[in-house]
Amino acid sequence: MSKDSILCVSYFDTILGPNTLYCNSTLNTKEHPDLGRILEFTDEEGNFVFTFRKYQTINHIFYINSEFARGGKELIMITYMIRAAYFKDEITDVYNYLLSKTPDLEKYASELKDFNGLTEFLHSHKNRTNQKNILGLASKKFKKDFLNIFNRYFEKMTPQISITSHLLAKDLKKVYVFGPENAGKTTFVKNLEVMQFLQYKNKSMKRDLANKIYDFLIDNIEILTYECIEDDTNGKRVKLYEDCLDNAQGFILIFNASNKDSIKETIEMFRLVLNRCLDKGEFMPILIIGNKFQDKEEITPDLIYKNFDMDELAECGLLMQYFSINVLSENEKIIEAIRWLLKKII
């Protein structure tokens, strides 16, 4: 069975805490989202999207009346996750596909609410330690009936795409971050991840379409390393490897706006990407961020636009926007910049 499409049923045990009832594939916390942590911090009924690296998930949380549970209700979560590589245009298509599975999750939840003996089974074997797929402890009839329903919904939700499809073999489309050394690229990416986590913990924050697609964008941002740059005999960077850029949906150029000496190298790196886009003849938005260290700004927006060839940029079909931001502290400006890039991509 393909590991690119996974269905799991989790529940909150009053003794063990979050636990897995059954999952059709073994989960690795380094690769898959931690469903226990999601269930631990979320107890409101409904559907929500959660993204994690290569896997994106749609989750449905609901309660089942139970005479065995403390408070008279069992907290259950159904999670369907999928690798974004199923889709040609991951950032938008994968979200729309997951959203389309909401009715299936709700119908599956309705059947579980009526599943005979489920709540009693969840409270049996209380001497067990926390383990994965406790369904193995159930009777043959219980297991057979449960899996019949589980497999029916899993097959219904799984994309009808051959696992040998070239879409699964290709790399994910990326938004690449590039720029001179010590410009704040790593700090920028880490700050995005922190803001994303805080949004998930903030229950009052509305998880609307824009915020959810914003999550997908963050999970597909990657720093373009110097291993992707060819050197000529003089040791100068002359070209970016094509396979590092062919999967790009956009670029983020970050430079030190507090040091005028960085402008030359910044423009040189911008030209590498621009020339590649000109060769491909494809639309590619570029977000330029001048990182203000300690809120000091020596390179102004006027200086940036003056030193970039706007005519050639227009011929390439690119869109460019400049933001002056302290990437360590100005979170609102960072979100504004990311949203500009997101709108250009979708």
Image (cartoon, rainbow, N blue to C red):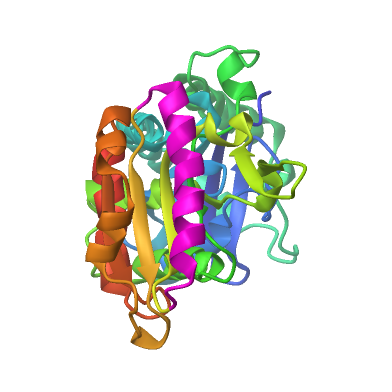
The relative height of residue 83 versus residue 217 in the rendered view (above or below) is above
Q: Residue at x 66, y 25 (%)?
A: 2
Residue 112 screen position, x and y as percent: 43, 39
- Position of the C terminus, as image quadrant, is top left
Residue most extreme to the front: 234
Residue 309 screen position, x and y as percent: 31, 44
Relative depth, front residue between 301 and 60: 301
Q: Is residue 175 left or right of residue 125?
A: left
The relative height of residue 47 versus residue 92 in the rendered view (above or below) is below
Q: Residue at x 64, y 57 (%)?
A: 124
Q: Is residue 173 left or right of residue 235?
A: left
The relative height of residue 143 versus residue 8 in the rendered view (above or below) is above
Observer able to see residue 116: no
- Magenta stretch mostly in which secondary structure? helix
- Position of the N terminus, as image quadrant, is top right
The tally of labels here is 0
Q: Quadrant of residue 165?
A: top right
Residue 246 screen position, x and y as percent: 53, 29
Residue 252 screen position, x and y as percent: 42, 52
Q: Is residue 153 left or right of residue 230?
A: left
Q: Is residue 280 magenta?
A: yes
**Region in magenta:** 259-282
Q: Residue at x 49, y 13 (%)?
A: 160
